[in-house]
Image (tube, rainbow, N blue to C red):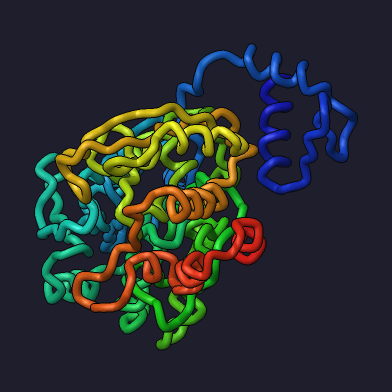
Amino acid sequence: MCKITIDLLDYICRARVILLWHDFVIFPFPLINKTLFLQAKDQCGPMANELPQTGIDTLLENKELIRKFSQQKVALLTNQSALTKDFVPTADALSKKLRGALRCILTPEHGWSASIAEGEKIKDGRCSVLGLPIYSLYGGDKRQLEDVLGDIDVLLIDLQDVGVRCYTYPATCAKLLEKMSKDRKEVIICDRPNPLGIHQRGPMLDPEYRSFLAFLDIPFQHGQTLGELLLTYNQSLQNGPLSLKVLSGERICRPFAYPWVPPSPNLPTWESILLYPGLVLLEGTNVSEGRGTSLPFTCIGAPDLDNQALVDFLNNSSGIRARPVIFTPQSGKLKGQECHGAHLLVTDFLRLDAFSLGLKLLFFLKQNYASFKWTEMEHKKGTYFIDYLLGTPMIRQTFDESLPIGEILEKFT
């Protein structure tokens, strides 16, 4: 009964039909006392000892597909963070099932290890354990990649997206579909839940600001899985849609119910993922979002910032608490500089609206941090990184007009 109650409530929360009111959880079923529900949840014991069923598990259980792919030339786009529900790396599991049919591995930003720093170009390589070549889609040999794509029969994709448009994995996949559309190859996407759920927040893309960071025509926090995004994008391919199929698993993500496996080095915890839609906005400013520290995307700060005032401001927000911290980033912007700021602790992820929190943070910093600046683009004088991060200049322009925060939130959330 406990598991059923939790799964049902999690689903309803993600479907936006839940209403928390005083001491009851109200939805289109008999009333459940909130205290009893929380007690039941506490009695469910520790974190699950397996990961949720995802598309790779669906594929591995499909004997017909495994038999088919075993007779073809297969490429796999993935990294070492993609695991089966039994914690086996996807590449290992497929190599064992498909044997010699798995010909190579393709990797996105952050590389095969999923631990290389953001923006760092990665050369092609080889996995000594699997005995397979690794072709980097983020800095590898483009001519060699074209030869590889021309030789394979089917592409399998298994990557964990994080639900925010500026995260580069969906753009990487979309550009790869464009390359493959010339040869009409088959594509199978082993889907994974969106860790931020179905909520959509933030601006749509302004086509004039399309870039690798803002590539797809979706809201900033898009509320879709990687498979759903690519199904839509596939229909827009200039050479016509590919034969593309999405293999699904669990649709609903359950934060903290099972271990989080970092898909990139600066999103190591559930807290960093849940706060990412808001704190990533600080990348467009001269304020640290925690890169280069042990608390990326869960702490913020800058030299001479009044951290107690920041903490008091943050502690009026729903779903989080904050504590004052002093830290010195070891890499990235503000490297080696002592920063005063706050460490954010997620106390109720169901009440947390991270994107709105990010806008409130920008408002606070503009009002209270005298040294606050928007970061200018290095190679485009007079342009700002925040505009390309968000895919529109409207948010920066709105803040520069000094509108009340209520109007800003109403306009963009």
Closer to us: 336 or 256:
336
- Left or right for 217, reference 339: right
Location of residue 165 in the rendering, given as x and y in whole percent from the top left corner: 44, 62
* Residue in the image at 52% along x and 58% along y: 221
Residue 179 place in picture, x, y as percent: 30, 77
**Extreme-right residue of the structure:** 30
How far across and how far down the image is residue 356, in percent?
57, 52
Task: Give the residue at x 24% y 58%.
Answer: 106
- Image check: 129 left or right of 150? left
Say if 211 sits above or below 32 in the image. below
Residue 73 on image: x %, y %: 26, 63
Residue 266 at least partly seen: no
Q: Nearer the viewer, residue 35 or 137?
A: 35
Horizontal placement of 24 versus 246: left or right? Answer: right
Q: Is residue 22 above or below residue 122?
A: above
Q: Is residue 81 left or right of residue 125?
A: right
Outermost residue toward the bottom in this view: 239
Residue drawn at point x = 26 percent, y = 70 percent: 377
Q: Where is 142 relative to 131, above or below?
A: below
Whether residue 249 is visible to the viewer of this picture, yes or no, is: yes
- Quarter of the image for residue 169 reads bottom left
Picture layout, residue 72 above or below residue 315: below
The quarter in which the C terminus is drawn is bottom right
Q: Residue at x 35, y 55 (%)?
A: 372
Q: How many numbered markers are drawn?
A: 0
Name the quadrant containing residue 210. bottom left
Q: Nearer the viewer, residue 324 or 222?
A: 324
Q: In which quadrant will I find the N terminus?
A: top right
